[in-house]
Image: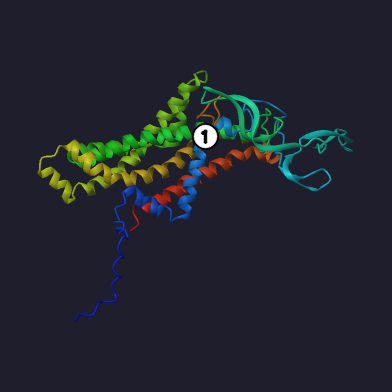
Amino acid sequence: MLARDTSLPPPPAEGTAVTKPARGNESYIALVWRRLKRSWTGMAGFWLVVLLLVMAVFAEFMAPMDPKATDVGFAPPQVPSFHDKDGNFVAWPRVYALSDSADLDPVTFQPVVGPDYDHPRLLGFFVHGAPYKLFGLIPADRHFFGSLDGQPVHFLGTDKFGRDVLSRAIHGSRVSLMIALTVVFIITVIGTTVGMVSGYFGGRFDVWMQRFVELVLAFPQLPLYLALTTLIPVTAPTNVFLAFVIIVMSALGWAQMSREVRGKTLALARIEYVRAAMAVGATDRRIIMQHIFPNVMSHVIVAVTLAIPTVVLLESFLGFLGFAVKPPLISWGLMLQDTATYSVIGTYPWILSPVGFVLVTVFAFNALGDGLRDAVDPY
């Protein structure tokens, strides 16, 4: 009589449902997401990018004030406090507006400006404030945070015209990110298409196309940006100036993407399944779209996440020089024009607040790009 192998699991009892083990049939996107979640920097960049996009889309709701409303010029930031005028701890946050006191400065004989502890402004979320139209259609007056009584609160101070810096920076994220995403989209479409076609067909077409790409890459970009943007008169409409800037930045940025995609295509065109598709008579369009394009997308996605911060920095720099966005639009680069003099920076350092938004945006997309690069190609 044969002995039963005790290493095997016992048979299921009668009436017990037998469940089959789940088979590893994850999609490519699921595998990339699972690898991305292992990188804490990649996930930090991912959630920061999500927050930046939400802030840009719902800028009117996220901003505590109307970005065009004026108040006291160069007012310092109002820091939330959890203490009352006697120094006792309070559970509800508040800010104290600056006001003239009864005391006089012994040198200038001007009223001493200080916090008004007798009239605190309580803070909260989802408060009523300045009316606006969400997406230009839905009238509303709710703001994500601000004072409960609807009084102006300047968490990052005001500029020389008394406009709230934080609200303007939040609204400026919409224009800055819109320019960056639009430029990168155009760069990706043109660069990917030209790179795949040039690398696949090769021959004389590839030679002439690469000479044109090298010509575009050889242009000194900064002087060319300044020269081209000065062709638009100052009196031109804002949307015309903005469209011209996007076209110029896209025309000078697609060549690098094309060179990278061409290199990937040259390697893919020699793989066996591509040669097999050629042998069975598949059209060039089908080979490019069905066999080459899906395999270069991983590189393109990573390149896009790394190109967006470059465009954000470029737009901020050109806006600082006055060649990117014109009022009444708001962008981070346009806001930095107020920091052109050292005396302003030294006296009113909170005017540099848009730099923090640019740094966070650059870090977020760079961290996401590094995480995606490791997740797409872990080896």
Name the side, left or right, on which 371 lies relative to 156: left
> Considering depth in this image, is 65 or 218 the residue closer to the camera?
65
Residue 188 lies, in percent from the top left, at: 35, 37
Q: Which quarter of the figure is the C terminus placed in?
A: bottom left
Q: Position of residue 237 (x, y in %)?
A: 49, 19
The residue sitting at the left extreme is 280
Picture coordinates of residue 355, whole percent (x, y): 58, 41
User: Which colouring convention does the figure follow?
Assistant: rainbow
Furthest-front residue in this view: 14
Quarter of the image with the N terminus in it: bottom left
Total numbered labels: 1
Give the residue displayed 26% in from the left and 76% down from the top.
5
Q: Position of residue 130 (x, y in %)?
A: 64, 26
Q: Nearer the viewer, residue 136 or 198?
A: 136
Residue 334 seen in render: no
- Give neighbour class at mark 1: few <14, some 14-19, many 20+ (Cα, 10 Å): many
Residue 73 picture quarter: top right
Frontmost residue, 242 versus 56: 56
Can residue 80 be seen at all in this image of the molecule?
A: yes
Residue closer to the observer: 39 or 296? 39
Q: Check disc 1 and report the residue beneath it.
A: 56
Residue 95 left/right relative to 183: right
- 144 horizontally vs 376: left or right: right
- Hey, which residue is sitting farthest bottom in the picture? 1
Mark 1 secondary-structure assignment: helix
At x 80%, y 33%, the residue is 99
Q: Quadrant of residue 308?
A: top left
Residue depicted at x 49% and y 50%: 44
Q: Quadrant of residue 203?
A: top left
Tag 1: residue type? Ala
